[in-house]
């Protein structure tokens, strides 16, 4: 996965952090968690606030669906 694989990262974050509300995660922690995902292979410098926000929202949508 790369930073541009927003939906895939959101799903992977849900699988790895099921009990965490994505809206409570700081971007610094989110960045670390994405970098630690199995199958994630991209440079840390390719991230930015806009991408992290999109990832957080994709993760949140998955989180909402899983907790309905």
Image: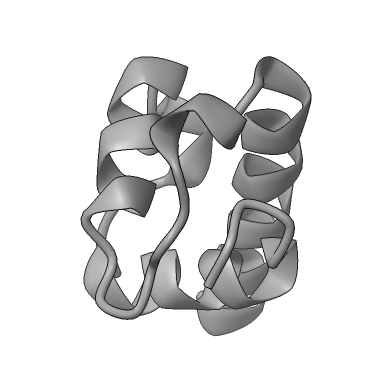
Query: Residue 8's x, y, as percent?
Result: 61, 77
| Horizontal arrangement in the rendering, residue 46 relative to residue 19 (left or right) | right
For the residue pair 57 and 5, the one nearer the viewer reads as 5
- Left or right of residue 14, residue 66 in this image: right
Q: Quadrant of residue 56?
A: top right
Q: Position of residue 40 (x, y in %)?
A: 39, 67
- Is residue 23 rendered to the left or right of residue 29? right
56 vs 24, nearest the viewer:
56
**Which of 53/45 is in front?**
45
Say which residue appears at 41% left-offset and 34% top-offset: 44
Residue occupying image coordinates x 26% and y 36%: 32
Q: Quadrant of the C terminus?
A: bottom right
In this rendering, is residue 50 above or below 67?
above
Determine whether 49 is above or below 43 in the image. Answer: above
Q: How is the image coloured?
A: one colour
| Total marks placed | 0
Relative horizontal placement of residue 39, taking residue 17 as reference (left or right): right
Give the x, y percent position of residue 51.
72, 35
Q: Residue at x 62, y 33 (%)?
A: 52
Q: Determine the image quadrant of residue 29.
A: top left
| Above or below: residue 23 compared with residue 38 | above
């Amino acid at each position: 996965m790369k930073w541009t694989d927003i939906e895939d990262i959101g799903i992977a974050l849900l699988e790895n952090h099921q009990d965490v509300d994505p809206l409570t995660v700081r971007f610094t922690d989110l960045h670390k968690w994405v970098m630690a995902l199995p199958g994630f292979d991209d440079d840390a410098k390719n991230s930015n606030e806009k991408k992290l926000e999109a990832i957080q929202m994709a993760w949140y949508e998955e989180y909402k669906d899983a907790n309905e």
